[in-house]
Amino acid sequence: MLLLVTRPQPAADITAAALRSRGHDVMLAPVLQVEAVDFELGPGLWSAVLSTSANAFHAIARHQRRAELTGLPAIVAGDRSAEAARALGFRHVIAKDGGVKGLARLAAANLPDRRHPLLYLAGEDRAGDLAADLAAEGFSVETVVVYRAVQASTLPQAVQEAVAAGRVDGVLHFSRRSAEAFLASGKAGGLIDRIRALRHYCMSAQVAEPLRAAGAGSILVAERPDEAAVLGLIDPA
């Protein structure tokens, strides 16, 4: 099958490699570009660093207080975030598979000391309210935005031509915002009817919502919000 991967770099290349190893053809159609933003850190002490995305760790790679941060425990959602944290130098990484849900409970189970706040390295656009979930577990939280995702105006020309020619079999979607951006980019290119006819592989029901609202007829939703489950939709065991 010829599949489109819509997630931003560097995750797009990793997903593409996994698909190619399974025998699929892949075209990259990144509809969001992740970029670091300037940020300030408070002077206080933190008990741990939290993040829901590997993008946060890429964003702090050159920060002057990197050594201070990597000396703290990191509590993260998913294997990719855990890998990025370890690659940056974090030695104590606690990871939860299956997305953000339950991350606050994971912090509560592993951080009995509530004297210092948690440092939440966040994106500019966030699904859910992790800070509120952490507060409900008795933590004070310092949320710092360290990256943002900028939406592309159009799909790459080669992708547009492949979709228009009917050569694309399916599209992988890993976030609600990227699904919305893909629809917007396709509409801008006059391809919305072709896009509705594609098969869409979605990480969660929330990711699938804008595709359903747009009239897409073939939507598959992963049982768990992680990449392995999305790939399992394409190649069931």
Image (tube, grey):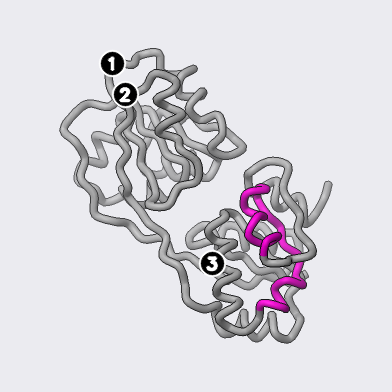
Give how far apart the Cα atoms at labels 2 and 1 are.
8 Å
> Residue under circle 2?
47
Local SS, label 3: helix
Q: Amino acid at mark 1?
A: Arg
Question: Cβ–Cβ below 8 Å for labels 3 and 2?
Answer: no
Question: Cβ–Cβ below 8 Å for labels 2 and 1?
Answer: yes
Q: Amino acid at mark 3?
A: Ala
Callout 1: few (<14), some (14-19), or many (20+) C-alpha neighbours within 10 Å? few
Q: Main secondary structure of the magenta part?
A: helix
Any mark on residue 25, and which?
none
Q: Is residue 95 above or below residue 124?
A: above
Quarter of the view holding residue 116? top left
Callout 3: few (<14), some (14-19), or many (20+) C-alpha neighbours within 10 Å? many
Instruction: Please state if 95 lies on the left or on the right of 215 as rendered.
Output: left
User: Tag 3 or tag 1, which sits nearer the N-term?
Assistant: 1
Of 186 and 50, nearer the camera is 186
> Residue under circle 3?
181
Query: Which region shows up in magenta?
Result: 192-213
